[in-house]
Amino acid sequence: MKQFTGVNGFLYTAALIVGGLTALAPRASADTATVPFSAALGGGCFFGGVTAGTLAKSGKTLVGTGGGVPLTCTAGGNLSVADPTQDPSNTKFAVGMTATVTNSTLGTALSPSASGGATSVVVPARATPYALNVSMTAEYSNAGHINNGTFIFRVTLTATP
Amino acid sequence: MKAVRKSNRTLTAPATPMVRMARILGGGLLGTSLLLTSLLTGAKPASADTAVIPFGGSLAGGCFFGTVTAGSLTFTGSPPTTVNGSSGVTTLTCTAGGNLSVAAPVTTGQHTGTASTSGTISATVTNTTLGTINSGGTSSVAVSQNATPYSLAVSMVHNNASTPLAPGVYSYNVTLTATP
């Protein structure tokens, strides 16, 4: 082992001290922090604002037209429509209540009591809403004609992704 | 008998003057050496000594973030068009006056949803003392030296305007930078 003595030893010691001081020279410390955010979003079907339809009397049948609602599916879905239901306070229509949903792209879906078509349609995912047109009919089964009054029906559409 | 004694003397090497001198000096040196040893060990007191080892250095000021609490995401709109991030938290301590800034959220490798390049995206950092900074506006604020850490609330928003967000994983990182 080499011994550092005399002048050489002094120089060696001095070098150590200078080196130590240099390593501890002031240096400003910056810092960063990363904050993570994460979640999963599933696909879904969403109806927009509803436009109420209107009713017109045609003999012993009430014909509803002009109903509408937009539908957006962010994943592929399925659209169906139920038979109309009548507000309990109205004169009862025992039979013949049907509903129809139509879109130029999707085609037409009929309610269970209707005949002559599919009861549901496939809805491909699309960012642009599908404009759905909704119509209905209600046949008065009792004797006589339909009395004047207020009639309220509701048509329920269901979209499942 | 005399003849024998004479014979013995002739067998022993006679001491020369040099040998006699050496014997005299050797005896003297030995005595002197013993005397000095006796004086030294008996008279000199114990010697204490000290050594001072210097340590020197300078510490510059710095800014340091504490533990990070991940935020959470919610989706708003029907269909969802906006991602809202909230409840992200961290702390900041500056041992010298500094500056805090926040960058816009960046999607991570796990992100499979709508790209952050669609719509607008920004991050916000709020502290009751420092105020609020936003990556889309005033994105930095001066931070004075503080012994008690500033608690920073971090939130973010990714607004895809009126376009529905695609299904998938939404994962972002918001980076805060503090420089003294």
Image: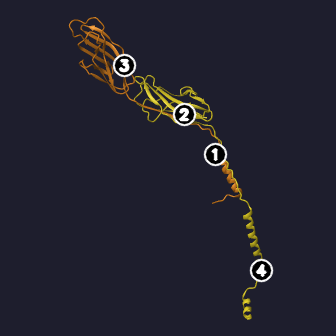
Chain colours: A orange, B yellow
- Three-letter amino acid code at disc 1? Ala
Estimate how packed mark 2 is, as few (under 14), some (14 to 19) or many (20 or more) residues with alpha carbons within 10 Å.
some
Q: Quadrant of residue A44?
A: top left
What separation in Å lies between label 3 and label 2 (alpha carbons)?
47 Å
Q: Which residue is mark 4?
A: B20
Location of residue A104 by image quarter: top left
Secondary structure state at the residue bearing disc 3: strand
Q: For this rendering, which residue is in front, A158 or B148? A: B148
Image x and y of residue A60, in percent: 24, 8
Chain ID for label 4? B
Residue at label 2?
B91
* Residue annotated with mark 1: A23
Judge if badges 3 and 2 mark residues of a common chain: no
Question: What residue is drawn where x is 75% and y is 85%?
Answer: B14
**Badges 4 and 1, same chain:** no
| Relative depth, front residue between A104 and B80 | B80
Residue type at tag 2: Thr
